[in-house]
Image (cartoon, coloured by chain):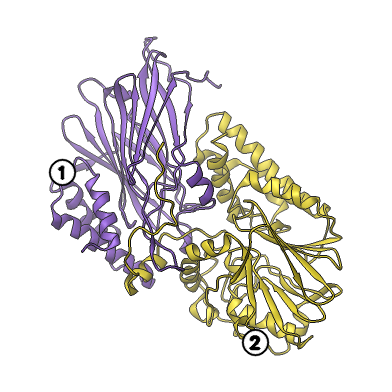
Amino acid sequence: MLTDMQRVQTKMTSHAGAYTHSPDRHLWLVLITAISLLAASIGVSPALAAEDVWADLKPDLFEDRTINDGSEWLALDAPYRAHDAALVPIKIVALKRQASDTYIKSITLVIDKNPAPLAAVFKLSRESGLASVSTRVRVNAYTHIRAIAETSDGSLFMVSRFVKASGGCSAPSQKNLNESLAKMGLMKLRQYSPIPSADGATKRVHEAQLMIRHPNTSGLQMDQITGYYIPAHFVDEIEVRHGDKTVLSIEGAISLSEDPTVRFHYVSEGEGELTARIEDTEGNVFEKSWPVAPAPAIN
Amino acid sequence: MRYGNRATEMRYGNRATEMSTTLAAGLLAAVVGICLVSSTHHAFAGCNTDGVARTMVEEIAPGIFVRPGVHETMSGENNGGIANIGFVLGTNAVAVIDTGGSACDGQRLRAAVRSRTDLPIRFVINTHVHPDHVFGNAAFKQDNPRFIGHGQLPRAIAARGPHYLTANRTIMGADALAGTEIIAPNLTVDDRMELDLGGRTLELTAHNVGHTDNDLTVFDVKTGTLWTGDLVFQGHLPVVDGSLKGWLTVMDELSRIPANRAIPGHGPVSIPWPAGLRPQRQYLTVLIQDLRRLIAEGRTMNHAIEIAARSERSAWKMFDEFNPRNASAGFAELEWE
């Protein structure tokens, strides 16, 4: 019989999409998680160095594939010292535009020392225009955060940053749980001005931000009064379409902050609609559309 | 739109195991506003209740006693005594309002009560969930009081309590927190409640989301003294752990209470009313204005955190420790406008 954590972990890994998992893999991730959790709770810095944690995670996420240095493809912007460990802003910057022959088809975000290290997988396409994405994550301890891009030819490129969570108080902030629950599923889209194109083409890369109201509870939080776990309830799938083309899809888990939000790009002539469809672990589906209406440039 | 299970509904029926307790405690519980690593020096000052008791509290109005907190982060040296806490004496009973940042802090407060009266301590009121206000509760168990709090306090304590204890044991040293327990209220206030201490009435009010989502204030009718808990800060930067906009609304409500003076959660033991609200209103308003402007400019959260409310920096202690947090929380809140 699975424990609660195994159930959460299994659910999480089963949504990893591109990665095939055997039951052994599930168990392995549970073990890694259990070890790091136990170490954290005892207050002992694991004897494992940062690279050792990654060395254990890597084969589970990427098998024995080669991971190249990604500094020509990506830059990762994250605060060195997180002010609110439940709301750490992460910006993954793509250094090259999506070209028809070579483009980034996915970016995997990993937070080594989190109980759920696989924070999100961003799937992109040529229609994304620019693979840059920003979001906010929960960081449990001083840790490396990694962005691994997979390009259209199947190569892997990685960049990483070290982030310090705020002392011993890192945790998801549920400042206003009633509000999060009452408004769950509400979505908002902010649209920014398009990136000017060098050749004056009408098709330009636009930037937008999808915001979702959702408590994104982790399932690892216990209700001390009852002794039961407060169940995991988080957004695990996000899909954004421009017209009928998918410009972004995200598989997420508990490392994404409460009220998940993502800033992304897509190619457009300034027409049409953007549609967001999200699904959470309770099977709730929320969908909303907005006409494309980019903001004027602010200078 | 379908609705999923509310977070409070029990879905998995397994009792927590020993290990799971530790795991949950070490992990993703709710964040605390006033809990930061101050230093790695875990000196334990010792819990000395002799000779400290009478002098540690100030009688700011007849029967109203306050122990001022220091403007620091919780540490082994200060035993977590960073908040204003105190008690009210009636002719029949005593009410304690917030118990401090450790069992020791609470023991000292209790000794201060006993240095002035033998009357039973019938009520221990917690203004909200933060550890510097609730960690001393265990010192009062022997009095068998009603532990009183906001209707949302039990859930907040359940969600955050174990994590607060574990995190603060690391920061302050386990010695400094010896005897500290998480004690939830056994009586809650959803709107208003009156307590009779004999010859004096305390009016308790449960507020909407402000500093936290479980803020309770206490008004002593006899002297017109308002205990605000952390709904009011002076000196120490206000800490946003609820809602930025909600807090300003609650402050409007509080300002209409015809109090003669107020006791803030952090700051001087007695402040004029409603003038005492001014510095905090200024800070929160500047923060909101700066954030709204930055959001309208399409700035990212990373960028906004560095600049919002900088003009207020010299007016407050602990600005660098808490303003970035307030800015990120405020940014996430105001983005939705």
Question: A293 or B218: nearer the eye?
Answer: B218
Reply above or below: A287 against A231.
Answer: above
Name the tint of chain B in the rendering: yellow
The residue that mark 2 highlights is B48
Q: Quadrant of residue B81?
A: bottom right
Residue A66, numbered circle: 1
Give the residue type that dot 1 points to: Thr
The residue drawn where x is 34% and y is 56% is A114
Determine the colour of chain A.
purple
- Name the side, left or right, on which B206 lies relative to A98: right
Residues tagged by mark 2 and mark 1 found on one chain of the structure = no
Please say if A256 is above or below A72.
below
Amino acid type, label 2: Asn
The residue positioned 47% from the left and 52% from the top of the image is A82
Q: Does B62 sit left or right of A6 as displayed? A: right
The chain letter for the residue carrying disc 2 is B
Residue B286 x/y as whole percent: 69, 41
Question: Residue B217, position in %: x, y?
Answer: 71, 61
Chain letter of disc 1 in the image = A
Apparent side of residue A104 relative to residue B238 in the rendered image (left or right): left
**Callout 1: SS:** loop
Q: Quadrant of residue A210?
A: top left
Q: Residue at x 23, y 63 (%)?
A: A31
Q: Estimate the spatial distance between the alpha carbons at disc 2 and disc 1, rounded to whole Å.
A: 61 Å
Where residue B263 sits, quadrant-wise, is bottom right
Q: Quadrant of the N terminus of chain B?
A: top left
Q: Residue at x 60, y 38 (%)?
A: B291
Query: Helix or strand or loop: what does disc 2 sit on?
Result: loop
